[in-house]
């Protein structure tokens, strides 16, 4: 069964969606969408390094993205530049360096479109293992840091005052962000990973009344997007990443209709 | 003076400097079990900063803080919940500690907001939200309660009831309370120790002592002194100080 590339892509996508659901909620709650973008851009550098050193792509992306994230935290402490300027600086410089390195790797045949937008044909059995084992680890760690992370998302000072160590939770969460980008890059592509994190979560916000529900709806939204997106990708021969994101946008629009209805009901 | 083991938190000449400006400097105070210490002072005098130093939120401080408890309940001065976060009162109650339903219901009943349990935090009025904040802080039965203007926006009768509740909690749980308040009436009637701040400690002591202090009078004006003296009046029926205050 795993011989079929489409089945592999589906299993991979489902694994990714289960993890991006809860992480995406935190990205929305903590306003980290541009941060996610920065990590994703830096992933290109990770990919090129993986190719040039014949390394595992997911592992290499994880290392580079983590390094960029830690650099960002250090820069935030040491300069007075605003956060978005720092993010832009890191995002575009790491993207640029990644592209320059690709130029040097002319001896390798590079599917840059697949890298930017995802390629379901490229998902191997090894990738499935990485996605599901890595994903399970991410969810486990997220569960462990849930209380301090969530409390500090609501109010940092409250969490700090009542002894929850929010700084540690934030640092660990940053690493988790690097990890999810690393395992989902082949599916969605590095330009669209943030969309996979944000859009299902934003859709979920429109229809949920508690944080737990939002996480669950976000997972369901992600799953539906992956399934819908992959089938249409197969049907219309489009890249997998854009198809998945377009499907999630479709679900988001549906959720807006729900809001309008509930507002009408209130009045 | 009570013995050292009753001390919950102690500030020794603590100060906090942000961007080369001292928000507060040289503050020494201690909160003991079962006692209410109140910080008063004008806007920007460093009350909230002092509370945050005591709580360990500000870490790069001058002087030192000794904290002898980890069971802390905190009501911040202001808290805003982003729309992106759907949060009901019930979810908020278990934010920093898991509590069972009875404990949650009991705390919400004490501050008279049990009927709001399933409401979204964003839909509450200022006073209701304040009651929820207080309920959350007391529900975990803390040893140290830090309340930064806990009754702001609460209606008049509610305010009196909540201050009575705070006093009751301090007695029942034997917890120490660090209170920031503008309401001198209530502060003075329920407080064991008052610290008057204005960037530094202007004066401190029992409410009566502080009321007689000239720096306090300069800061708050004549009327404020009279408020205090009236309390003295009510409590021990000594009339001498009122005359003295009027003279000043």
Image (cartoon, coloured by chain):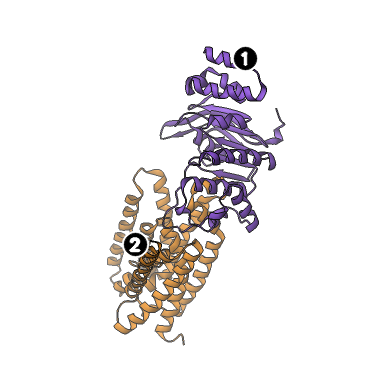
| Residue at the image position 32 percent from the left and 66 percent from the top | A191
Disc 1 versus disc 2: nearer the observer: 1
Up/down of A44 relative to B136, above or below:
below
Q: Is mark 1 on a helix, strand or loop?
A: helix
| Residue at the image position 53 percent from the left and 67 percent from the top | A137
Q: Is residue B247 visible?
A: yes
Density class for disc 1 (Cα within 10 Å; few <14, some 14-19, many ≥20) is: few
Quadrant where the N terminus of chain B lies?
top right
Which residue corresponds to mark 1?
A: B240
Up/down of B89 relative to A201, above or below:
above
Q: Which of A178 and A36 is in front in this view?
A: A36
User: Where residue B189 appears, x then y in whole percent?
Assistant: 61, 30
Farthest residue, direction top: B247
User: Where residue A195 appears, x then y in whole percent?
Assistant: 36, 66
Q: Do the residues labelled 1 and 2 touch (CB within 8 Å)?
A: no
Q: Which chain is tinted orange?
A: A
| Residue at the image position 64 percent from the left and 54 percent from the top | B103
Q: Which mark is residue A99?
A: none
**Mark 1 and mark 2: Cα distance apart in space:** 76 Å
User: Where residue A60 appears, x then y in whole percent?
Assistant: 42, 65
Q: Is residue B67 visible?
A: no
Residue A61, by quadrant, is bottom left
Of the chain colours in the picture, the one used for chain B is: purple
* Chain of residue at mark 2: A
Q: What element carries label 2?
A: helix
| Residue at the image position 34 percent from the left and 72 percent from the top | A250
Density class for disc 2 (Cα within 10 Å; few <14, some 14-19, many ≥20) is: many
Residue A52, by quadrant, is bottom left
Which residue corresponds to mark 2?
A: A41
Up/down of A218 relative to B183, above or below:
below
* Chain of residue at mark 1: B
């Amino acid at each position: 069964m795993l011989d079929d590339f489409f089945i592999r892509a589906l299993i991979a996508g489902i694994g990714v969606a289960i993890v991006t659901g809860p992480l995406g909620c935190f990205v929305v709650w903590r306003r980290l969408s541009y941060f996610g973008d920065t990590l994703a851009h830096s992933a290109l550098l990770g990919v090129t390094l993986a190719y040039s050193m014949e390394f595992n792509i997911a592992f290499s992306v994880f290392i580079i993205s983590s390094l960029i994230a830690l650099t960002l935290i250090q820069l935030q402490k040491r300069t007075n530049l605003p956060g978005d300027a720092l993010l832009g600086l890191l995002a575009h410089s790491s993207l640029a360096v990644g592209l320059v390195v690709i130029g040097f790797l002319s001896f390798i045949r590079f599917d840059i479109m697949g890298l930017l937008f995802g390629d379901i044909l490229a998902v191997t059995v090894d990738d499935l293992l990485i996605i599901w084992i890595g994903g399970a680890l991410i969810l486990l760690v997220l569960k462990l840091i849930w209380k301090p992370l969530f409390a500090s998302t609501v109010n940092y000072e409250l969490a700090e005052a009542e002894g929850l160590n929010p700084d540690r939770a934030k640092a660990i969460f940053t690493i988790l962000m690097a990890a999810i980008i690393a395992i989902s890059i082949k599916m969605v592509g590095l330009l669209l990973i943030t969309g996979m994190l944000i859009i299902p979560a934003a859709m979920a916000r429109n229809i949920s009344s508690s944080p737990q529900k939002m996480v669950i709806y976000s997972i369901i939204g992600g799953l539906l997007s992956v399934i819908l997106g992959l089938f249409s990708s197969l049907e219309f021969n489009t890249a997998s990443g854009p198809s998945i994101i377009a499907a999630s946008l479709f679900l988001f629009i549906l959720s807006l209709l729900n809001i309008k209805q509930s507002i009408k009901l209130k009045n | 003076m009570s013995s050292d083991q009753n001390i919950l938190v102690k500030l020794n000449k603590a100060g906090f400097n942000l961007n080369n400006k001292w928000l507060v400097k040289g503050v020494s105070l201690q909160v003991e079990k079962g006692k209410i210490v109140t910080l008063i002072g004008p806007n920007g005098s460093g009350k909230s900063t002092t509370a945050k130093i005591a709580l360990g939120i500000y870490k790069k401080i001058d002087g030192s803080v000794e904290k002898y408890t980890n069971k802390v309940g905190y009501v911040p001065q202001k808290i805003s919940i982003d729309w992106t976060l759907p949060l009901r009162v019930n979810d908020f109650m278990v934010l920093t500690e898991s509590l069972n339903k009875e404990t949650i219901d009991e705390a919400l009943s004490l501050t008279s907001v049990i009927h709001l349990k399933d409401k979204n935090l964003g839909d509450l009025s200022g006073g209701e939200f304040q009651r929820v904040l207080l309920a959350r802080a007391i529900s975990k039965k803390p040893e140290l309660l830090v309340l930064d203007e806990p009754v702001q926006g609460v209606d008049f009768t509610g305010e009196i009831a909540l201050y009575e509740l705070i006093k009751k909690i301090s007695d029942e749980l034997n917890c120490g309370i660090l209170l920031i308040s503008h309401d001198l009436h209530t502060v003075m009637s329920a407080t064991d120790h008052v610290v008057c701040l204005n960037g530094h400690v202007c004066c401190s002591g029992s409410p009566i002592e502080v009321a007689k202090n000239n720096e306090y009078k300069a800061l708050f004006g004549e009327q404020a002194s009279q408020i205090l003296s009236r309390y003295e009046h009510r409590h021990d029926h000594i009339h001498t100080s009122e005359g003295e205050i009027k003279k000043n």
